[in-house]
Amino acid sequence: VNRNIYFHLMFVLSLLSVGVSSQPITDGQRLFSIAVSRVQHLHLLAQRFLSDFESSLQAEEQHQLNKIFLQDFCNSDYIISPIDKHETQRSSVLKLLSISYRLVESWEFPSRSLSGGLRTQISSKLSELKTGILLLIRASQDGTEIFPDSSALQLAPYGNYYQSLACFKKDMHKVETYLTVAKCRLSPEANCTL
């Protein structure tokens, strides 16, 4: 099983190739770098689309949307995750990876309801990110099962474009933070403070 994971990991790494550093890095560090890069791209993409959408609104419309969003919750809010940076810092690498996986997985179905341009740009990146995180989890768990129910989450799409973008941006920011902290923990010389 570990040999299959290793070959699958190497295959994904070769498909998602990253720039080569002058210092030798491990396969795990490289996969973390790829995952962090993917989630940063998704987070920035959501931020850009949200900013473009907000700038197209009149001031009163923007104010009303902000009030509505503050009252609404994101579908992923039910996923138990660290409540602050201190809890994030105390969480294990495996826990951070598991939460990240669930957050990414929670967007598979709702992302299909996004507008064409955004849906097209995030669809493959979400899939690659989910695969990468799953490989990192498998490499970290040493045979222990952390997903008792491996079926994909089927959350309903959001009611409006603004809420979808705002929630997607929020969730990708969380994943970016968790993956960055987990990656940092594997680097002995790094300072992992948030």
Image (tube, rainbow, N blue to C red):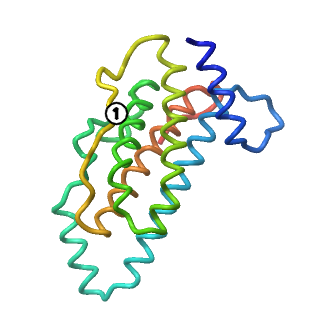
Instruction: Name above or below for residue 192 compared with residue 138.
Output: below
Residue at 36% across, 35% down: 86
Instruction: Name above or below for residue 113 compared with residue 33.
Output: below
Name the outermost residue toward the left.
71
Apparent side of residue 10 relative to residue 157 in the rendered image (left or right): right
In the picture, the quarter occupied by the N terminus is top right
Q: Position of residue 137 (x, y in %)?
A: 48, 25
Apparent side of residue 15 relative to residue 42 in the rendered image (left or right): right
Instruction: Name above or below for residue 190 compared with residue 188.
Output: below
Q: Position of residue 2 (x, y in %)?
A: 58, 12
**How many marks do you count on the picture?**
1
Name the outermost residue toward the right.
22
Apparent side of residue 65 relative to residue 35 in the rendered image (left or right): left
Q: Position of residue 131 (x, y in %)?
A: 52, 35
Choose between 153 and 78: the one closer to the eye.
Answer: 153
The quarter of the displayed image where residue 8 is located = top right
Instruction: Name above or below for residue 106 compared with residue 27.
Output: below
Residue at 49% across, 30% down: 134
Name the outermost residue toward the bottom.
58
Residue at 38% across, 15% down: 145
The quarter of the displayed image where residue 104 is located = top left
Residue at 41% across, 12% down: 144
Give SS at disc 1. helix
The quarter of the displayed image where residue 116 is located = bottom left
Q: Which residue is mark 1?
A: 87
> How many neighbours does mark 1 have within 10 angstroms: few (below 14), some (14-19), or many (20 or more)?
few
Q: Position of residue 158 (x, y in %)?
A: 26, 60
Q: What amino acid is labelled 1 in the image?
A: Glu
